[in-house]
């Protein structure tokens, strides 16, 4: 199964980990990635710590835990390639249009941040 199909079908929780240039780590809850192609994903970000970190350190890791009783999921190792700030493009990518963006975030500039998928591992273990 293609990785994009996996994420289309699975429900669960995601966490994006980034670090600043000094290696100070930040972890934030993120929705499933938006697939641009099988090697490129994107996340919609506001101008907060995660976005600040990927400006100076392009490496990140995304951990996805599947919903349900079993412990399963994916770990994606990523490198930022570029970003966009066009509001129309960002709105076209949003998958949960019924989600009401909190008022404090409505005013923040949003970015569509693209990452190359460097490596994919299961949630547990090191076999792909």
Image: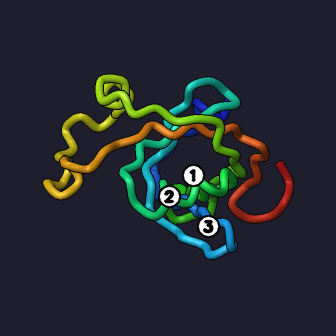
Please determine whether, in this image, residue 112 is positioned above or below residue 11.
Answer: above
Q: Nearer the viewer, residue 30 or 124?
A: 30
On the image, the x and y values in percent for residue 124 come to: 73, 64
- Say which mark, if any, is on residue 6: none
Q: Is residue 48 left or right of residue 22?
A: left
- Say which mark, if any, is on residue 55: 1
The residue to which callout 2 is attached is 52
Q: Nearer the viewer, residue 19 or 68?
A: 19
Q: Quadrant of the N terminus?
A: top right
Residue at 64 percent of width and 32 percent of height: 40
Residue at 60 percent of width and 73 percent of height: 25
Q: Earlier in the sequence, mark 3 or mark 2?
A: 3
- Count the marks: how many? 3
Q: Is residue 9 visible?
A: no
Please determine whether, in this image, residue 41 is positioned above or below residue 74.
Answer: above
Residue at 46 percent of width and 64 percent of height: 49
Kindly state the secondary structure of the residue where label 2 is placed: helix
Q: Earlier in the sequence, mark 1 or mark 3?
A: 3
Pointers 3 and 2 in contact (C-beta within 8 Å):
yes
Kindly state the secondary structure of the residue where label 1 is placed: helix
Q: CA distance from mark 1 to mark 3?
A: 9 Å
The residue to which callout 3 is attached is 20
On the image, the x and y values in percent for residue 50 come to: 49, 60
Q: Is residue 27 left or right of residue 89?
A: right
Pointers 1 and 2 in contact (C-beta within 8 Å):
yes
């Amino acid at each position: 199964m293609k990785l994009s199909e996996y994420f289309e079908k699975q429900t669960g929780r995601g966490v994006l980990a980034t670090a600043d240039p000094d290696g100070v780590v930040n972890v934030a809850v993120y929705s499933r990635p938006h697939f641009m192609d099988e090697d490129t994903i994107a996340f919609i970000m506001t101008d907060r710590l995660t976005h600040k970190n990927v400006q100076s350190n392009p490496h990140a890791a995304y951990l996805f835990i599947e919903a349900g009783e079993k412990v399963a999921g994916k770990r994606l190792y990523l490198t930022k390639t570029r970003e966009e700030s066009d509001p129309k493009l960002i709105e076209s990518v949003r998958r949960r249009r019924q989600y009401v963006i909190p008022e404090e975030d409505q005013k923040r500039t949003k970015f569509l941040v693209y990452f190359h998928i460097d490596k994919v591992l299961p949630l547990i273990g090191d076999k792909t």
